[in-house]
Image (cartoon, rainbow, N blue to C red):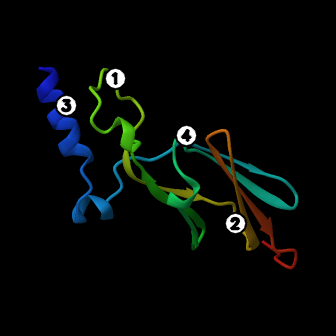
Amino acid sequence: MLARAERLHHEFFRLGAQSAQRPAWEPPVDVFETDGEVIVLVALPGVEPDKIQMTIDGNHLVVAGTRVIPAVLRQALIHRLELPQGRFERRIPLPSGRYSSMRPAKENGVLMVLLNKQSDYRG
């Protein structure tokens, strides 16, 4: 049964042309707003910063990327696998307004995106 589970795991997380296009999971987020900015926190433990893409699409912040099992663990016997692997994408609705800049920072497995509100916008 463990061999079957391991085989299914490897098939599920194999990166192919189709799976690279479709997200397999969505990370949890928190959104905060101050007078001057919107702060978005995205839980991404184990995701390398260079594997994360961020864009603003209309009134959404789109955070996408890939979490992969480290190479040293790819041949390991899996006893428990709760952290989702593969491609992720999260479309986060933003408060109405315009944003003049986007500053990402990653610390302790959390991506923090600071979106400065454009001062001349009159929502």
Residue kind at label 4, given as amino acid type: Pro
Horizontal placement of 10 versus 24: left or right?
A: left
Residue 85: percent from the left, percent from the top?
37, 43
Label 4: which secondary element: loop
Q: Is residue 8 above or below residue 98?
A: above
Kindly report the distance in space between the C-alpha atoms of the residues bearing marks 3 and 2.
46 Å
Upstream in sequence: badge 3 or badge 4? 3
Q: Amino acid at mark 3?
A: Glu
Badge nearest the viewer, 4 or 2: 4
Q: Residues within 10 Å of mark 4 (few under 14, many from 20)?
A: some
Up-down relation of residue 83 to residue 30 (above or below)? above
Mark 1 lies on a secondary structure that is loop
**In the rendering, at what x and y percent does residue 84 appear?**
39, 39
Mark 1 burial class by Cα count in 10 Å: few <14, some 14-19, many 20+: few
Q: Earlier in the sequence, mark 1 or mark 3?
A: 3
Residue underneath mark 2: 96
Q: Label 3 to label 4, Cα distance in Å?
A: 23 Å
Q: Which label is found at residue 80? A: 1
**Mark 3 or mark 2: which is in front?**
3
Neighbours of disc 3 within 10 Å: few (<14), some (14-19), many (20+): some
Disc 4 marks which residue? 45
Read off the residue under disc 3: 6
Q: Are marks 3 and 2 in contact (CB under 8 Å)?
A: no
Q: Nearer the viewer, residue 62 or 72?
A: 72
- Counting residues from the start of the chain, the first of labels 4 and 1 encountered is 4
Distance, label 1 to label 2, CA atoms, is 42 Å
